[in-house]
Image (cartoon, helix red, strand yellow):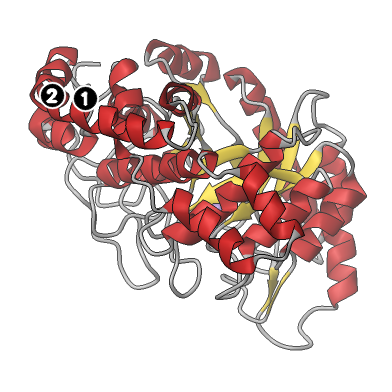
Amino acid sequence: MTNRIDKHLIDQANTKDMTALQEDYDALANQLARKDIDIEQITAKAQEFQIAVPSWGTGTGGTRFARFPGEGEPRNIYEKLEDSAVINDLSQCTERVSPHFPWDKVDDFTELKGVSDSLNLKWDSINSNTFQDQQDQTHSYKYGSLSNTSEAAREQAIEHNIDCIKWGQALGSKTLTVWVGDGSNHPGQQHFQSAFERYLASMKKIYAELPADWEMHIEHKMFEPAFYSTIIQDWGSNILAAMELGEQAKSLVDLGHHAPNVNIEMIVSRLIQFKKLGGFHFNDSKYGDDDLDSGSLHPYQQFLIFNELVDAQYRQQPGFNPNYMLDQSHNVTDPIESLMNSAASVQRSYISALLVNREQLSEYQLNNDALMASNTLKNAFNTDVSPILAMARLRKGGAIDPIATYRLANYRNSVAKVRPSTGGNGSGIV
Ligand code: RM4
Ligand code: MN
Ligand code: MN
């Protein structure tokens, strides 16, 4: 693991920023103390926060039109792990990696687990892929996978998901995430109910193979690749499927998978209420499934989602334990930088939401004081918690300024020398 960030370099960069950070941290501590908030308790929460990195997010993504590969891109899961380790070395909140199969399939999963252990990384949810045909695949998914009219194609897709569970067990994962592109492009092309029945029957077969301590997360998405109807197009179809399958099946919310302006935080609240919130794929979007960096466009929406999550934590809602993960496509940035920025952005939303005065908010709500209720949220959102995030990283051995330290380390240039471009797309187009 010669290319990871040297600890001395991190310390050196931190030394330079230390005095300014301490001053800012003390000032924020005073500001919070006036509101009866102990900064140390909040910093401890920041230190505990974790969000998983998607293996495919470490490569440059693409659009339907082109992909412009960057220098030194990871060419396989081992190199994706190296890059993930860099992200965690500097950010100290991304110790889990979420793999996508068969993109990340290897012959020897014990060896892969050994490598991730040596990098102090763990495995998050396993993502199955039945939205593409692989080389040497017997049955095509052109007309769908789990809901295909062909039983043989459905069986092949079921088998792949069961394999994913087995590979996940070897890696120590506990979740299977199922997103399928199944749907139609023409009105009348598919019988809505029959297609959903076929999907559910297939999902039941996968669910039957789920180990007792695993969860299955169902991910909805409004459109793309199907442009007229998609089998699990919204959280309604999603929760119906999860309820039909059983307790271990939950819904996953990808922020880019809704119609524009949908109130995602309210969907989150509903899923929490009915013990069906499995987890998140964080990213941001302006138009559709843009997969932009988390919080780059709608930081307030991200905060409002965390307001619901922290509220559930505060009320100790039973069965509440969602997975947090990034799911982004980086077209014009260095993926490592985007993932570090995004992890910190999601962490920021969480920490800001912890500052909401919940007793006061509840009183304003009961008294229908709309203005003060809204101001209570804005107050927390407008507090700059950067010193808390930086201090949490520093205390865990990470970088006060992850991007600057990463650039100083010259990591990308040094891996570019040993990772000649394949010209291909090891990460898939996301
Ligand atoms: C989909 C969805 C899934 C991801 C694929 C690559 O749009 O977000 O989570 O696995 O892209
Ligand atoms: Mn997703
Ligand atoms: Mn997506």
Residue 252 seen in render: no
Say what amino acid the circle numbered 1 marks. Gln
Of residues 186 and 254, the one drawn nearer to the viewer in this rendering: 254
Give the SS element for disc 1: helix
The quadrant of the rendering that contains the C terminus is: bottom left
| x and y, in percent, of residue 6 in the image | 16, 16
Residue sitting at 66 percent across and 82 percent down? Answer: 228
How far across and down, in percent of the image, does residue 82 sit? 31, 26
- Residue 50 placement (x, y as % from top left): 49, 30
At a point 87% along the width and 35% down the height, the residue shown is: 208
User: Which residue occupies 86% across, 58% down?
Assistant: 240
Left or right of residue 360, residue 91 in this image: left
Count of numbered marks: 2
Query: Which residue position holds label 1?
Result: 22
Crowd around label 1: few <14 · some 14–19 · many ≥20 (10 Å): some
What residue would you read off at disc 2?
Answer: 19
In the displayed structure image, the side of residue 354 where residue 340 appears, left or right: left
Label 1 with label 2: CB-CB less than 8 Å: yes
Q: In front here: 34 or 402?
A: 34
Label 2 residue SS: helix
